[in-house]
Amino acid sequence: MALSNNVIGAINFVAVLLSIPIIGAGIWLNSQPDNSCVKILQWPVIILGILILVVALAGFVGAFWRIPWLLVTYLVAMLVLIVLLACLVVFVYMVTIRGSGHLEPNRAYLEYRLDDFSGWLQRRVRRPYKWDRIKSCLSSTSMCAELNQSFRMAQDFFNAHIGPLQSGCCKPPTQCGYTFVNPTYWISPINTAADMDCLNWSNDQTQLCFNCDSCKAGLLANLRKEWRRANVILLVTLIALIGVYLLGCCAFRNAKTEDLFRRYKQGYT
């Protein structure tokens, strides 16, 4: 049984290592300015990674110190955590399946519309009390000021591949027909009735289009891109964890079989 316990311990050590990418994915999300403003996905990912780390360590201790009840607890708890991780992977995939940008004539950057995203994501930004907090956080960043430092000429700006947040929050929507002065200052056309965002645009550098639906859509587009990247890490880790868990179950069963066989031999002799 000692050999089987060593195998179980080694398998649990691999499970400990597999918790690191999950925690790392959560920390990476939290380091992104938009995710740090929204605070939706990163903490569930970090907490789940820490729980997997703790449970794997418990299994590691139970194997090397031969504590059967701790190994059983590990098997049950790890199964629950694997199911939770699988649910999280599926959930992230489902809420990010929609939300592509749209090309506008003579523009290299994309425009984003709020209705293109999943209803669950839309509800995270449509409620005024939530958006006011997010807007205050986003407007405190330097993302719009960076555009003024990078682009002086209109054509250079129109040919730029700027990110979803900058496209949605730092300039008016292209369909509004505003005239470029610099990336964050535009001359209003006579008719601004094309969209409510056209009326919500402000040349006040603290306001810009942070009250626009296009800004909310740009935020969701950025979240979608980052969440999908993190979800790839979670999916790969999930598959590896399932493999490790199945190996652990087989090793535990073999250990129990060896123990029963040893007791039988002792009783027989």
Image (cartoon, rainbow, N blue to C red):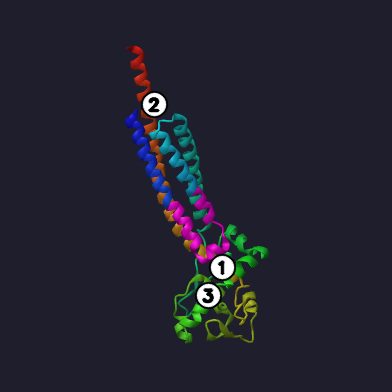
**In front: mark 2 or mark 1?**
2
Residue 174: quarter of image: bottom right
Residue at the far top in the pictured view: 269
What is the three-letter code of the residue carrying label 3? Ser
Q: Is residue 229 left or right of residue 134?
A: left
Examine the structure image and report whether residue 62 is included in the region drawn in magenta: no
The answer to whether residue 72 is above or below residue 103 is above
Give the magenta range: 21-48
Q: Distance of mark 1 from mark 3, alpha carbons?
A: 19 Å
Place of residue 187 in the rendered image (x, y in percent of width and height, measured from the top left): 59, 87
Q: Secondary structure at mark 3?
A: loop
The residue indicated by pointer 2 is 256
The residue indicated by pointer 1 is 217
The residue indicated by pointer 3 is 142
Label 2 vs 1, first from the N-terminus:
1
What is the three-letter code of the residue carrying label 2? Lys
Residues under numbered marks 1 and 3 in contact, where contact means CB atoms less than 8 Å apart: no
Q: Distance of mark 2 from mark 1, alpha carbons?
A: 56 Å
Q: Secondary structure at mark 2?
A: helix
